[in-house]
Structure formats: structure tokens, C-alpha cells
Image (spheres, rainbow, N blue to C red):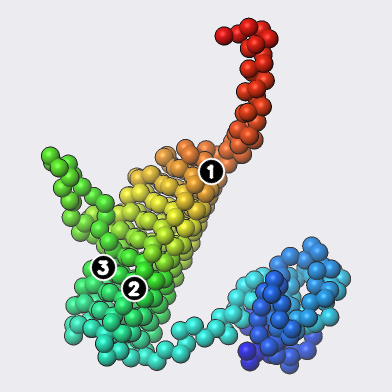
Amino acid sequence: MNLTLKQIAEMSQSELKGDENFKPCGICGLDDVREGALSYSNNIDKPEAFKDLKLGALILPLAAKEKEIPFSGNIIYAKNPEWAFTLVMREVSTLNKDLKPGIHERAVVSPSAKIGTNVFIGANAVIEDGASIGDNTIIYPNVYIGKNVQIGMYCIIYPNVVIREECVLKNKVILQPGCVIGSDGFGYVFNGKHEKIPQLGNVILEDDVEIGANTTIDRAKLNHTVIGANTKIDNLVQIAHNVKTGMSCICVSQVGVAGSTELGNGVILAGQAGISGHLKIGDGAVVGPQTGVISNVKPGDKIMGSPAMPYGDFMRLNVIFKKLPELYKELTNLKKKFKFF
């Protein structure tokens, strides 16, 4: 790490109290403190927790200026300490920075594919006819890119990703290892037996989308499956054909979204939530973990349970559920006392 505290404060638009020329020896979390390193905390409710830390510098919220913080090192006051620390992490990270642009000799790239400038293509990657790769994009080894796929600038495609024909990735898209973009939607018609319906559409990933490891996003039957800009999808998620998400949605691990459902902007689907098909989930809605959604959700609603219900109702029912053995025992005693049958 070769950053001074002055540089760190400037890049994060923060206020420094201490030696502007001090260079932390590295970064660390408060659960594994390194002497002389830089760390951060959003929580200043217990200032005494900072007393014996041997850090070189600590990033704290602006409100810390109004408190007595018993920390002897340098302090950076930031509007959002986690974001300030994230900027430092980005600056010191070497991830993907040591890759030299070029096409590996064992990669298979169609002569009709269009490759931008400063593109890295690793060993055993396959890029089919008509595909296009934007500037500064990284294609790791063992990636398959199908015919006429369009990939924008500054994308990162990690190993063993499959992007099938005609799919579109805009700029700054990240695909984690093993995810599949554009697999066939689960569509069949019964004609004495289950007959496959061709899935002729594609998948569009808008700018700044990240897709987790081993997640699958199915191509549309006729039009587009669309993942909106800045949406983040965790590992092991299934997005079915013709689904459309708005901007800045979050889908946590093991979520399943059935076909033709639409998510508004800023929707959060917590782990293992299941969303039935052809529904509309309104802007800003929050779907709790393991929730089963079988009807439309209004904007801003917070729901939980299976079938889904308002979060407050779920919590009240959960309290009652825990008391059922006691209530059953009381009911049994009452039946005996009054000879109810």
C-alpha cells in the first residue's frame, strides 16, 4: 500500500485529523487488527472499543467529531466510512490489474468476431461467429461466448461462464465463475407428451450488472429477459424466461423467479425467496427469506412467509406459533374440565 492519508482523504472527500503524510502498512478489519494498518467503523456507539487499537488510521463517521474517541492514531472522518474504505480497497487491489491485453494462443476466436482494444482473452476461451467484445473487457479461460453475442466495455467474464447466442451484455458487467446466460427457458406444450417450445429470444444485462457464481438466467421465448442496470444477483439464483427487473435490484442466494414476472426498481429478494410467474413486484418492495410469493406485491411493501403476508402479520403469527404447545395444553385441560368433546 503506497497511499498517504492525505491521498485517502482526498479520494473519499473526507476530513483528516492527523499526519497527512502517514502511509498505512495495509488494510484490515476490526476483527483482525494489524498494527499500523487502516480500518473503518460505521458504529461509534461504544467509543471505548477503539481505545487499545494499534491501527495506523481509522475511518469513522462525521458524527465522531462530536464525541470523545479514545483512539490515539490518525482519524479520517467520512460521510460514509464503508464507502471511503471501499475506495481504498479498490485502489490497492491487484485483482485483474496484472493481465496483459491479448488473445491466448489456445483461445478459439472466430475470424468474424470483433475484438476491441485492450481486451484480454484467456486460454481455451471460445468466441463464436459474429460476437463482439468491447474495449478493456476481460475474458478468463474456459469461457464460451456464442454466436452474435454482444459484450460491452470494461466487462469481466470469469472462468467457465457460458453466454449463449444473441445475448447482450452492456458495459461494466461482471459474471462470476460458472454462471449461464441465455440457457433455454423452461417451456413445453403437452401434445400427448411434453414437446419442447423453442426459446428464440435472448437475455439483456444492462450496465453495471453483476451475476453470481452458478446462477442461471434463461433466454426469453420470443423477446427479452432483461436485468436492469446496477442490479446485483447472488450465487445460485434462477431467473426464468421473460423476467424483467428494474434498476438496482438485489437477489440473494437461492432465489427463484418464475417466468414473465416483473420486478420494479430497487426490489430486494432475500435468500431462498420464490416468486411465482406473471407477477408484478413494485418498486422498493422487500421480500423476506424463504418467502413464497403467489400474488402481486405493491411498491414499498415488506412481506414474509409462505404464502407471503405483510411482515408485521408474519412476526405476530410467529409469536403465536411458538405458544401453540402451551395453548393446546390449556385447551385440553379445559375440555376435560368442562367435558367438551
Q: Residue furthest top?
A: 339
Real-space Cα separation, disc 3 to disc 1, in angstroms:
35 Å
Q: Alpha-carbon neighbours of circle 1 within 10 Å: few (<14), some, or many (≥20)?
A: many
* Sequence-earlier tag: 2 or 1: 2
In which image quadrant can residue 245 be found? bottom left
Disc 3 designates what residue?
164
Amino acid marked by disc 2: Asn
Answer whether residue 153 is visible to the viewer in this image.
Answer: no
Amino acid marked by disc 3: Arg
Q: Alpha-carbon neighbours of circle 3 within 10 Å: few (<14), some, or many (≥20)?
A: many
Left or right of 214 on screen, residue 82: right
Disc 1 designates what residue?
303
* Sequence-earlier tag: 3 or 1: 3
Q: Position of residue 81 (x, y in %)?
A: 68, 72
- Element at label 3: loop
Disc 2 designates what residue?
160
Answer whether residue 172 is visible to the viewer in this image.
Answer: yes
The residue that appears at 47% across and 51% down in the rendered structure is 272
In this view of the protein, which residue sits in the foreground, 68 or 11?
A: 68
Real-space Cα separation, disc 2 to disc 1, in angstroms:
36 Å
Label number found at residue 36: none
Real-space Cα separation, disc 3 to disc 2, in angstroms:
13 Å
In this view of the protein, which residue sits in the foreground, 335 or 301?
A: 335
- Element at label 2: loop
Q: Quadrant of the N terminus?
A: bottom right
The residue that appears at 61% across and 39% down in the rendered structure is 315
Above or below — where is 6 with respect to 233?
below
Q: Position of residue 101 (x, y in %)?
A: 37, 90
Left or right of 262 on screen, residue 192: left
